[in-house]
Image (cartoon, rainbow, N blue to C red):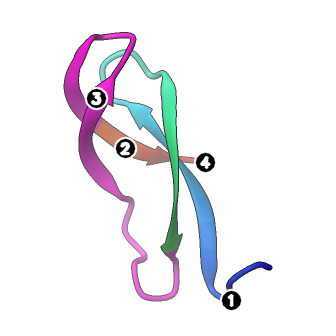
Amino acid sequence: MKKKGRQIITLACFDCKERNYTTTKNRKTHTEKLELRKYCKVCRTHTLHKETK
């Protein structure tokens, strides 16, 4: 069942551009792009992950 107003987004590593994570966000309340520090298995370190299309 799809929740109303929430969209699935993909997070990509800022350093190697690898798409590692998916999550959801409410685009009506959070219009800016999401940025989180997460572990990248390619870089083998915690890096900044940004929302992609």
Which of the marked residues, 2 or 1, is nearer the chain's N terminus? 1
Q: Is residue 40 magenta?
A: yes
Callout 4–callout 1 Cβ contact below 8 Å: no
Q: Nearer the viewer, mark 4 or mark 1?
A: 1
Mark 1 Cα shell of 10 Å, populated few (<14), some (14-19), many (≥20): few
Q: Image point 37% across, 16% down: which residue? A: 41
Q: What amino acid is at disc 4?
A: Lys
Q: Image point 35% across, 58% down: which residue? A: 34
Image coords of residue 22 (percent x, y): 54, 47
- Secondary element at image label 2: strand
Callout 4–callout 2 Cβ contact below 8 Å: no
Which of the marked residues, 4 or 1, is nearer the chain's N terminus? 1
Q: Image point 33% across, 23% down: which residue? A: 40
- Secondary element at image label 3: strand
- Secondary element at image label 1: loop
Mark 2 Cα shell of 10 Å, populated few (<14), some (14-19), many (≥20): many
> What is the CA distance from the residue labelled 2 to the residue labelled 3?
12 Å
Residues drawn in magenta: 26-48
